[in-house]
Image (cartoon, rainbow, N blue to C red):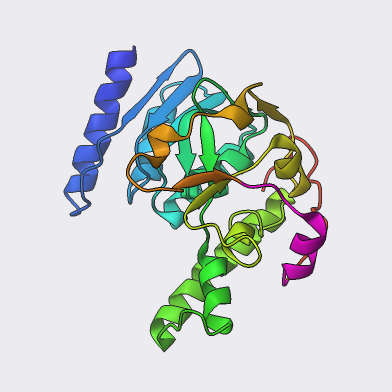
Amino acid sequence: MRALLCAAALLALSACSSTKVAPVVIALYVAEGVMTYEGPIRRGSFARLEVVAAAQPVHTLRISSSGGSVTEAISMARWVHARGIDVEVYGPCFSSCANYIFPAGKDKRIVGSGILGWHGSFEHRVYQHRQGETLLGKEELAQFEAVAAQERAFYDDLGLNGYLPWFGKIAPYRVRNMYFLSQEDMEYFGLTSLHVRADYLKSDLARWNALEKNTLVLLKVDRAVTNASDPLWAEPRRTPVGSGL
C-alpha cells in the first residue's frame, strides 16, 4: 500500500511538472492513517498532499521540512486544521513549517530530533518597510501586504498571536537567523495541546549551526518587553478544540 501511495505522489508530481512547476524531492506517503511529509514546501505541494491523502483517512501528519512557500504552507495548514489532524514534528520544522503547519495541528507533538525554527513572516517584512528599515517598491509592497493579510486571517482563525514568528527578529532580541522557544513561551503566544519531548531545551544545535554561527538559538521571552513592542498585541483568543476554519 505504501508503495502505491508513493507512486501516486510521483504521478502527482509528473502532473505538476507539465505546468512547469520545478520538481520537489520529498517523501510523501500514508500508512495506517499517518501521513509523512519530508522535504521543502513548494508550489504544488498542497495538491500532491491532497492526492495522497485521498487514498485513506489521515489522523496525523508527521513532518520534517525546512519550510518554503508561504501560500502553499497556509493551504496545507488550513487543510490540517479543518480536519482536526494532529501534527508531529520529528526533524526540523523551520520557517513556513513552524509558522503555519505546526500551529494548525489539533495535538502538536515534537518528538525524536524534532525542533522548530522561526525567522520572520510577511507581516514582519511589511513592518520593516513601515519602520524604514527595508524599503519595498510599490508593487512589491502590495504583494507583501496581500500575503500578510492571509497570515493575519490564518492566525485569527486559529486564535494565535501572529507576532510569534517574528518578534525575535526585532529589538531587543534581534536574532540573527532562527530561534526556538520553550513550551511555556510557545503557549504564551496561544499554541495549545503541546507535547514537547523532555530534552527539547537541550537540543543539540550543532547540526543546524554547522554552516553558520548562531543559525538557531533558544530565545527566552521577556513578556513585558514583548507585549510593549508588539504593534498589534492582544492576548491570544482560544479557538475551541476541534473547530474548523
Towards the viewer: 85 or 204: 204
Q: Is residue 91 left or right of residue 20?
A: right
- Quadrant including the N terminus: top left
Q: Is residue 222 left or right of residue 71?
A: right
Q: Is residue 150 left or right of residue 196?
A: left
Q: Quadrant of residue 24?
A: top left
Q: Quadrant of residue 193?
A: top right
Q: Check the image and report above or below for 37 versus 229.
A: above
Residue shown at 75%/47% (left/top)?
A: 190
Query: Which span of residues is magenta-colored?
Result: 219-231
Q: Check the image and report above or below for 240 versus 148.
A: above
Q: Is residue 54 visible?
A: no
Q: Is residue 2 magenta?
A: no
Residue shown at 77%/63% (left/top)?
A: 225
Towards the viewer: 91 or 5: 91
* Residue 88 x/y as whole percent: 55, 27
* Residue 197 x/y as whole percent: 63, 22
Residue shown at 80%/41% (left/top)?
A: 240
As drawn, which residue projects farthest toward the front?
213
Q: Check the image and report above or below for 129 versus 157.
A: below
